[in-house]
Image (cartoon, grey):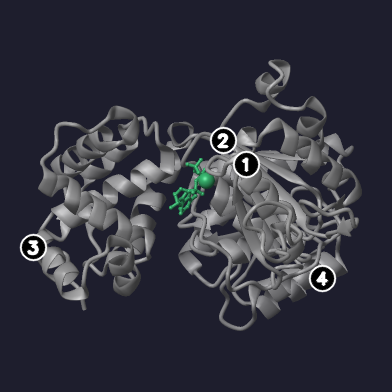
Amino acid sequence: MVITRALIIDDQDSLLNSLRIFFELRGWEVTTASTGREGLKKARTLQPSLVILDLRLPDMDGQEILERLRHEMPATQVIVVTAFQDMDNTIRCIKLGAFDFIHKPIDIDELETALNRFSNVSKAQGAKPPIEAPLHSVSCEDSPYIVGKSQAMKDVFKKIAMVSDSRVTVLIQGESGTGKELVARAIHYQGAYRSHPFMVVDCSILVDTLTESQLFGYEKGAFTGAEMMRKGTLESAGEGTIFFDEIGELPLRLQSKLLRFLHEKGYTRVGGTQPMHSEARIIAATNRNLEQMASEGRMRTDLFYRLQVVTIYMPPLRDRRSDIPLLASSLLEKIGHKLRVPIKSLTNGAMQELESYSWPGNVRQLENTLTKAAVLTKSSVLDKEDIIHANAHIDRSSPEKGGVDKTLAEVEKEHILRVLNAKEGHLGQACRTLGISRPTLRSKLKQYGVNQT
Ligand SMILES: Nc1ncnc2c1ncn2[C@@H]1O[C@H](COP(=O)(O)OP(=O)(O)OP(=O)(O)O)[C@@H](O)[C@H]1O
Ligand SMILES: [Mg+2]
């Protein structure tokens, strides 16, 4: 095998040519193929050290080609070319043993980074290309949609692929709004136990006793009002996943109980003595510095170590600005569907504004700003001013900043849109939460310029 021999499989001639030039300039021997079948044939004869594989080919499914390549020639590494919308596909490809992935349209810097990584790994292995056992392939329809093309997000995707089929405990750390819950859901829904429940325990909003009985269940008569036995989350989750959101807020007494569960999978219902058992997988998230909390005695050190068997760090948006254009367009699409408003696009100026802002509230703030701009702007294109205006509004209206300078009508409108957003655009559910009738909601939305079909 020639270490610097690459095979490029893609059905787009122009792309094949550019990639050929890219590789040849860096001293590689290059062969190209424009169909899957031709690619497989050439790979078998040439045994290249690297294959660049477009997943969308006219004659064969790219994943199948990847699977065959990894099976027949494990020393050949494959970098797959995917569309950024295909997060599920990408994770599946990593599980099948793809070395890396790059997005289409191809960004040269991204390709260069992947190639450097390939060279470093090959060198580190004494010029012997790395051999990684292919993992299982899974299909998943319910997986949440995570967007990102920065190196930091690629690393997150890879970690999701690595941990999703196992039952290992995962700790997701990162600032508020960076996508921690989204990642927890992806781990669950990409995994082998995805048909089991995914349950969320928000440690920040429940009072001590309620959390305990919610988590572990209770026996009849355990406390006033416990008129019958109730199953807890650990029992209801079965072999599914329990996501402990804001784990840093879990009271110390419950931390010991959770630790015992993590060690032995055992627990007892509140007011009960019978030992219970659960196979539920635990994923926890926090935006706090748990290590510091542990050193201050607010978090059990042993629980902290037990939780962080695998840690996924979600980088703040300001540290991965290259994700902003993709996030903005996919969020605008999501917002359009959710609120049933026409999907808006962005001027260059608007995009620059988004890319230069610091986003202290991360992706959630970006989503809120775009929602506000999409609703407030009549035109189908959002410009810089629309973004600045919407963002200023969000900044002022964030709970930390009080928002005491608004009229009642403004507060009402914001609240209605927030509820509608939370209910995924479902009018009936929004009406129930708001305590108003459907015609009233409709007329208010009309007043705000939100089209309802
Ligand atoms: N990479 C991403 N691609 C698409 N949407 C994202 C991404 N990251 C975050 N979001 C969206 O941003 C919002 C916040 O994400 P999420 O709730 O997962 O963040 P979080 O880290 O759990 O925040 P918090 O700490 O405030 O609970 C959600 O609406 C989510 O869909
Ligand atoms: Mg969250």
* Residue drawn at 11 percent across, 49 percent down: 409
Which is in the foreground here, disc 2 or disc 1?
1
SS at mark 4 in the image = helix
Q: Which residue is mark 3?
A: 447
Q: Confirm or reject: label 4 Cβ below 8 Å from ligand 1.
A: no
Q: Which mark is residue 285?
A: 1
Q: Amino acid at mark 3?
A: Gln
On-image quarter of the N terminus: bottom right
Residue 84 location (% of width, % of height): 50, 59
Q: Which mark is residue 174?
A: 2
Q: Is residue 6 left or right of residue 386?
A: right
Q: Confirm or reject: label 2 Cβ below 8 Å from ligand 1.
A: yes
Q: CA distance from mark 4 to mark 2?
A: 44 Å
Q: Which mark is residue 407?
A: none
Q: CA distance from mark 2 to mark 1?
A: 8 Å
SS at mark 2 in the image = strand
SS at mark 1 in the image = strand
Q: Amino acid at mark 4?
A: Arg
* Residue drawn at 40 percent across, 51 percent down: 327
Q: Is residue 121 left or right of residue 348?
A: right
Q: Which mark is residue 44?
A: 4
Q: Amino acid at mark 1?
A: Ala
SS at mark 3 in the image = helix
Residue 438 location (% of width, % of height): 21, 74
Q: Confirm or reject: label 1 Cβ below 8 Å from ligand 1.
A: yes
- Which is more toward the observer, 211 or 50? 211
Which is in the foreground here, disc 4 or disc 1?
1
- Which is more toward the observer, 112 or 317? 317
Please report whichever mark, 4 or 2, sits nearer to the chain's N-terminal start: 4
Q: Relative to residue 122, is residue 243 depicted above or below?
A: below
Q: CA distance from mark 1 to mark 3?
A: 40 Å
Q: CA distance from mark 4 to mark 1?
A: 45 Å
